Image (cartoon, rainbow, N blue to C red):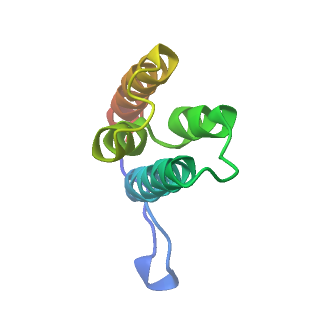
Amino acid sequence: MYAYVDHSAGGFTVKEALYIWILLMSLITFVTFGIDKNKAVHHKERISEKTLLTLSLIGEAFGGLLGMKVFHHKTLKKKFRLVSLFAILWVMILFACILSVI
């Protein structure tokens, strides 16, 4: 039961759109963590924790976790680890639900 999508018109299936969303939001979240780390090192105005946590929740936790590891940023803050792990679980459940319907 797959919906027909005319790819010549630039349309995406739900599965393709989900992959694109995860890829783009992971990249945006990863880069945002890197920018905030750079600002922290140079004592400049920072990106709020609320923004970083929101990106991890609605965007993509994989990019947030990778950013935390690569940039050694926010790794000691328990709420960032918990939110990232919760968001990964949420994405896995969402993926399972969507893929089982498609």
Q: Is residue 38 left or right of residue 54?
A: left
Q: Give the residue drawn at x 66%, y 39%.
A: 51
Q: Give the residue drawn at x 51%, y 83%.
A: 9
Q: Give the residue drawn at x 50%, y 50%.
A: 41
Residue 42 in percent (x, y) is at 55, 55
* Nearer to me, 71 or 8: 71
Q: Give the residue drawn at x 53%, y 53%.
A: 32
* Nearer to me, 66 or 85: 66
Residue 89 in percent (x, y) is at 37, 22
> Is residue 66 shown above or below 96?
below
Q: Is residue 47 left or right of residue 56?
A: right
Q: Residue furthest bottom?
A: 8
Which quadrant holds residue 98?
Answer: top left
Residue 94 in percent (x, y) is at 43, 30
* Nearer to me, 21 or 46: 46
Q: Is residue 82 left or right of residue 65?
A: right
Q: Is residue 49 left or right of residue 11?
A: right
- The quadrant of the picture occupied by the C terminus is top left
> Is residue 80 shown above or below 98?
above
Residue 24 in percent (x, y) is at 45, 59
